[in-house]
Image (cartoon, grey):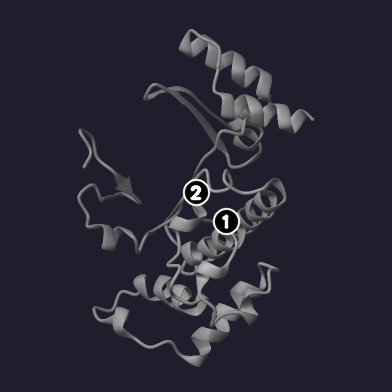
Amino acid sequence: MPDEGRVLLDGRDITFLPEYKRSRQIGRLFQDPMRGTAPHMTIEENMALAYLRTAKAQHAVFSRISAADRRLFREQLARLGMGLEDRMSQPVGLLSGGQRQALTLLMATLVTPKLLLLDEHTAALDPATAEKVLSLTRQIVAERSITCLMITHNLHSALELGSRTLMMSDGRILLDIAGEERKGMTVETLLEKFRAGAGKALDNDRILFSEAGRAN
């Protein structure tokens, strides 16, 4: 529960709304690819769980998946380019971390949410897989015009993606840029503004390593 303030979504106060009700409006991807899926359930069952939890009918969770629903699942899985549409009866626990994260992305957006939360959702993946999952994320968010909040330690991603960038330190928002100011922003100026606001240089190893890797 929050210590103070309110959480508003689309003008509605959801601060104390039960999680199962919030889940119908908010999709989320965790940093750990293992947290977004149920490993002992099949791919189809995971997709069904995500699909039915968003339904508004009181007893929808006990509904059955139709042939049309299965076709929808296959179509969505096929866009991943990972062959998962031919493995729908296999347990999710047999998939790699990247495959599970891509599946979680589909599950979180199978029914378009009002808000998609991305908690460093590519940080635990190898570079090639991370790039693929990020590309899928951009495509789905753009196609469905989803409002998205992404946490990242990669400053290039922070500037390349979305329309607004915020930097925080010790629980405080130090920088909030959008519009024309953001268009001309570089990683170097971003670091300089952080230094001016925080009174110290950015010394987060994860950020610095990600920048070094980008430069190389």
Q: Quadrant of residue 95?
A: bottom right
Helix, strand or loop at label 1? It is helix
Residue at 63 percent across and 55 percent down: it is 133
Does the image show residue 183? no
Residue type highlighted by circle 2 = Cys
Q: Residue furthest right?
A: 216
Question: Residue 64 versus residue 38: which sits nearer the camera?
Answer: 38
Does the image show residue 209? yes
**Which disc, if any, is residue 141?**
1
Numbered marks: total: 2
Label 2 belongs to which residue?
148
Residue type highlighted by circle 1 = Val
| Label 1 neighbour load within 10 Å: few <14, some 14-19, many 20+ | some
Helix, strand or loop at label 2? It is strand
Question: Residue 180 versus residue 200: which sits nearer the camera?
Answer: 200
Residue at 48 percent across and 13 percent down: it is 197
Residue at 34 percent across and 61 percent down: it is 23
| Mark 2 or 1, nearer chain start | 1
Q: Residue 138: x percent and y percent?
A: 63, 53
Q: Is residue 52 above or below residue 192?
A: below
CA separation, marks 2 and 1? Answer: 7 Å
Quadrant in which the C terminus is drawn: top right
Cβ atoms at labels 2 and 1 below 8 Å apart: yes
Residue at 33 percent across and 86 percent down: it is 63
Q: Is residue 50 above or below residue 30?
A: below
